[in-house]
Amino acid sequence: MTFCWKSTINLAMLNLPVLQWVSRDAALIISARGFRTFSQSFVAILIFFYLKQLGYGILHVGVFLSVGVAGVAFFAFIVGLIAGKIGRRRLMVTFTLVSSASALALIFAENYWALLSLAFIGGLATGGGGGGESAAQPLEMASLPDTAPTERRTELFAIYSIVARTGTALGALAAGLPILYQDSFGLSAISSYKVMFLAFAAFQLVGALLYSRLSPAVEGAPTQRQWTNPLKLPSRRIIFTLTGLFSVDTFTTSMVHQSLIAAWFNTKFGLEPWQLGQVFFLSHVLTAISMWVAAKLANKIGLLNTMVFTHIPSSLFFMVAVFAPTAWIAILFWQLRAFMSQMDVPTKDSYTMAIVGPEERVAMASMHMVSRSATGAFGPVVTTQIWTVFAASVPFVASAIVKIGYDLSLYALFRNVRPPEETRRRQQPATAEEPVA
């Protein structure tokens, strides 16, 4: 049964008549992700400055980020096995509460090994690319397709991504709050960062509350409520091939983690957190706009074409930004890159959930998250190592080149694998020409 947004959460930016087809469960899931990405965004920017205040260097930052991403990979793998038996809603609440508790513990931990443990358990280093990665995300992705008609699936994932990106944009602005705390309340830099970690924990609690209000419908059909072995699924070949390709994409994305880009802007041009917050806010706003454009474009040219043909220009823009001689030119091309770099996100989510069966969606989303997080764990470490040995520009250019190779490989392997609605659209003209019996 479908309800309008007014009957659940009054999100002004989405409270439009055109979105009355969005169900109550979808609204709750999307809202929870918005709160999560908001808090993850300001942590992703501030973690570099926080660890710097504690006396740790750029290599320590890279390891911290990698360990956080590895934690998401580990728990996402567990989700793929147990979600059907334990329950999607219960796991979403649990993982969000664990993240909240980890952030609270981070306030009191200064030992590096303790910091790494919290990053792993709570996924505190994720969200650098705006995606708001979490062990709860595969469960969200698997649940959303059942909450809307097939022809609305891509638009629903676009809304899901737009809200996430809007949360990320606002979180980037919030990264400037520590300066306000220092000037207005006389807090030290490190204390002002800890206040933000406390806020992170609070927003995670809000997300857990929203998940707890989901209906039993998000659990899927009774036949899906069992232990899952990804190696025995009918679509296992598609699942593992796609996740292998996506792992390459994620590795290159993790090499330009938002924390590392913040460090690069700070090192090369001297930009401070409040300035970086404005830069990232604009880039996330542009990305949010592009995601709705991507959904409409996909209806015209197809999901896979949209994924590939918008990704390649973004990599080229990024390479120009890396070699920009001044801050404003670098910011300009960073924003151009931002507009196109994430147009594959809603289309990729929609595509992966469409080409497998309903009973395989959690496994697909989980394996996707595992591959993303497992390979993404190496990106920050690789970037910081190459940065220290060669120069900051080298890992960023390398990531762009490899990403272009990934796009071309994806298109070559999956250009003939289409979701059901695209297959129907291709068949309609031929059907219309057939004589009526």
Image (cartoon, grey):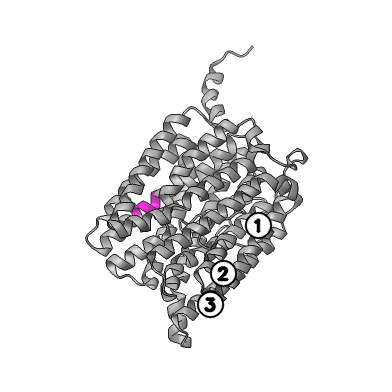
Determine which of the numbered discs, if any, sits on residue 200 in the image: 2
Magenta stretch holds residue 320: no
Which of disc 2 and disc 3 is earlier in sequence? 3
- Measuring 59% from the left and 36% from the top, which residue is drawn there? 354
Left or right: 333 with respect to 68? left
- How far from the left and from the top, in percent, is residue 309? 39, 39
Whether residue 273 is visible: yes
- Measuring 67% from the left and 44% from the top, which residue is drawn there? 81
Left or right: 268 with respect to 188? left
Q: Distance between the residues labelled 3 and 2?
A: 9 Å
- How far from the left and from the top, in percent, is residue 68? 52, 59
The image quadrant that residue 280 belongs to is bottom left
Whether residue 392 is visible: no
Determine which of the numbered discs, if any, sits on residue 132 in the image: none
Secondary structure state at the residue bearing disc 1: helix
343 w.r.t. 415: above or below: below
Q: Magenta residues, as a range?
A: 336-340
Which of disc 3 and disc 1 is earlier in sequence? 1
- How far from the left and from the top, in percent, is residue 128? 46, 59
Q: Please rate how many residues cluster around mark 1, counting C-alpha atoms within 10 Å: few if below 14, some from 14 to 19, many from 20.
A: many
Determine which of the numbered discs, if any, sits on residue 195 in the image: 3
Residue placed farthest to the bottom in the image? 186
13 w.r.t. 221: above or below: below
- Mark 1 is on which residue type? Leu
- Mark 2 is on which residue type? Phe
Callout in the foreground (1, 3):
3
Q: Mark 1 points at which residue?
A: 28
Q: Is the magenta stretch mostly helix, strand or loop?
A: helix
Callout in the foreground (1, 2):
2
Q: Please rate how many residues cluster around mark 3, counting C-alpha atoms within 10 Å: few if below 14, some from 14 to 19, many from 20.
A: some
Which of disc 2 and disc 1 is earlier in sequence? 1
- Measuring 64% from the left and 11% from the top, which residue is drawn there? 437
